[in-house]
Image (cartoon, grey):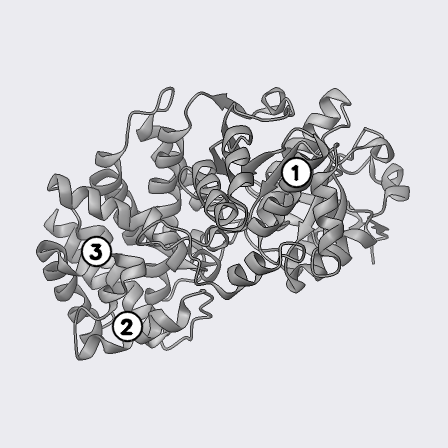
């Protein structure tokens, strides 16, 4: 067996001839950034940019302290702690080339379930300049149909009544900003790194709703002083597999318990609006712009929606990964037709972006055979994703008289997916969604009421009342329930356009 080295700070000098390692003195780093929600994407994106910046400039004021708000975050905390908060980033190119580097920008990790007061104090510390978030779409606690804060959430009710012992992100943000104001410290910037359109505006709206209910005077201070820059983030980052861990050991001689694997493409477009200073991420590839809107809409409506198209249709068909689905000529043709005929017509002009080249690049990236992004991961929390990624495109095309055929089939497939939970070959799906039970109940009624799934108003709003959409959806869902051969319907739609 090839000799391998445990990933620890004291062993970095043993690895530097094999892979790229941090060149800066991590012991002198300050936690200028508190990041809530340390997962694979954060570690392949914001932490990667920050590590690159620290290597490039030697400025150590922007180290990252991770925060986990759930008991489920304990495993990540423990593994990273055992590795001195170091981890390996494995970048897999379509041609088979693999690049690996050790990321050192995370310098600490706290669990709120162990000590919420300590987390509040760390966020309120004068060193903290930014609190960033990857809490997934569902973590913003908004009603997808209305866009308003969901005060019915029991955890929200708990946090409103227990400001010193919060459980959700908005409780921690409110408590720590209140403490900073009392201490005369400037506020930190709240920076969303999630795939939510206008993610900064959404974060601000949700925080002001929560804080306004708990402490109206503080809410006014937050509104006047705290910055919430919108941003578009992009890097395909599948879940880590045992094969990735073994690759790290066998090919690079590194024993690391939870590496991150990702594609080479990486993009971060950010509005330059910060309360208390910011890292110079533009020196390592990030782009600062006055208005991120057209960039994020392009990405959400093409990349994220494209993932959902392949995820739901591919799952019903029996594909297991994104690259497997897009290597199927029928799925590649269908995806490109959706992009060209339904997503592109409702996009805004994007300065400096060739949309045709961008769509070509998406097909190329999706087809990376070395990423193996599972459709099960893509379909996670679809109830939080599809209203923004896909249903918004349907609404805009209905208003403009545009094509809706391609997206409507995805909604029909989602109904079958939520109801039967099986591919056409009888393989059971692992469905993970905060609204799993509601989706299942609504979909179960389809055989008695063809529009039953659409009547789930928090997801679809009044879409069931749109005659054009409901008629087309009814035709498609009835055909799918009669015969779940999704390819046959895809071919029919392509032939009709």
Pointer 2 residue: 443
Asked if the residue under mark 1 is in contact with the one under mark 2, i.e. CB atoms within 8 Å, the reply is no
Report if residue 257 is visible in the image: no
Residue 20, image x and y in percent? 75, 34
Which residue does the image show at 63% across and 25% down from the upper left? 278
Report if residue 108 is visible in the image: yes
In-image side of 93 versus 390 (left or right): right
Pointer 1 residue: 47
Between the residue at mark 2 and the residue at mark 1, the CA separation in whole angstroms equals: 40 Å
Residue 10, image x and y in percent? 91, 43
Residue 210, image x and y in percent? 49, 49
Between the residue at mark 3 and the residue at mark 1, the CA separation in whole angstroms equals: 37 Å
Q: Name the foreground residue: 402 vs 121.
A: 121
Q: Name the foreground residue: 131 vs 422.
A: 131
Residue 91, image x and y in percent? 61, 41
In-image side of 456 versus 308 (left or right): left
Identify the image quadrant of residue 317.
bottom left
Q: Residues within 10 Å of mark 1 (few under 14, many from 20)?
A: many
In-image side of 387 versus 91 (left or right): left
Pointer 3 residue: 408
Q: Is residue 215 above or below residue 471?
A: above
Q: Is residue 328 above or below residue 102?
A: below
Q: Name the foreground residue: 267 vs 168.
A: 168
């Amino acid at each position: 067996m090839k000799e391998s080295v445990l990933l620890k700070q004291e062993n970095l000098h043993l690895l530097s001839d094999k892979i790229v390692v941090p060149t800066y003195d991590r012991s002198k780093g300050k936690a200028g950034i508190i990041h809530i929600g340390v997962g694979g994407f954060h570690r392949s994106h914001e932490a990667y940019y920050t590590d690159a910046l620290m290597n490039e400039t030697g400025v150590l004021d922007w180290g990252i302290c991770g925060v986990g708000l759930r008991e489920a975050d304990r495993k990540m905390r423990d593994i990273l702690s055992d590795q001195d908060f170091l981890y390996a980033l494995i970048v897999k190119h379509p041609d088979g080339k693999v690049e690996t580097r050790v990321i050192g920008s995370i310098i600490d990790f706290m669990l709120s379930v162990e000590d919420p007061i300590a987390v509040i104090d760390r966020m309120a510390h004068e060193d903290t300049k930014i609190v960033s978030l990857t809490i997934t779409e569902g973590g913003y606690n908004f009603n997808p149909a209305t866009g308003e804060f969901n005060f019915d959430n029991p955890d929200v009710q708990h946090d409103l009544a227990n400001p010193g012992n919060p459980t959700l992100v908005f409780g921690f943000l409110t408590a720590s900003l209140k403490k900073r104001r009392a201490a005369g410290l400037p506020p930190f910037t709240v920076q969303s790194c999630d795939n939510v359109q206008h993610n900064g505006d959404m974060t601000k709206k949700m925080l002001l709703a929560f804080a306004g209910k708990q402490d109206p005077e503080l809410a006014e201070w937050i509104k006047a002083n705290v910055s919430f820059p919108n941003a578009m983030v992009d890097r395909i980052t599948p879940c880590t597999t045992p094969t990735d861990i073994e690759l790290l050991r066998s090919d690079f001689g590194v024993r690391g318990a939870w590496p991150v694997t990702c594609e080479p493409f990486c993009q971060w477009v950010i509005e330059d609006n910060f309360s208390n200073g910011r890292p110079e991420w533009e020196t390592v590839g990030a782009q600062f712009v006055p208005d991120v809107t057209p960039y994020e809409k392009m990405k959400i409506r093409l990349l994220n929606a494209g993932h959902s198209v392949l995820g739901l249709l591919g799952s019903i068909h029996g594909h297991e990964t994104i690259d497997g689905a897009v290597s199927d000529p029928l799925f590649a043709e269908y995806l490109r037709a959706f992009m060209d005929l339904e997503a592109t017509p409702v996009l805004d002009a994007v300065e400096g972006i060739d949309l045709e080249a961008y769509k070509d690049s998406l097909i190329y990236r999706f087809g990376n055979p070395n990423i193996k992004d599972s459709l099960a991961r893509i379909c996670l929390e679809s109830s939080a994703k599809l209203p923004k990624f896909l249903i918004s495109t349907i609404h805009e095309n209905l208003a403009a008289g545009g094509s809706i055929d391609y997206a409507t089939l995805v909604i029909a497939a989602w109904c079958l997916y939520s109801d039967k939970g099986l591919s056409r070959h009888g393989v059971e799906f692992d469905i993970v969604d905060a609204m799993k039970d509601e989706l299942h109940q609504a979909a179960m009624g389809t055989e008695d009421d063809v529009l039953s799934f659409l009547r789930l108003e928090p997801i679809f709003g009044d879409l069931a009342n749109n005659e054009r959409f409901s008629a087309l959806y009814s035709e498609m869902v009835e055909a799918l329930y009669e015969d779940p051969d999704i390819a046959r319907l895809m071919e029919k739609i392509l032939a009709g356009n």
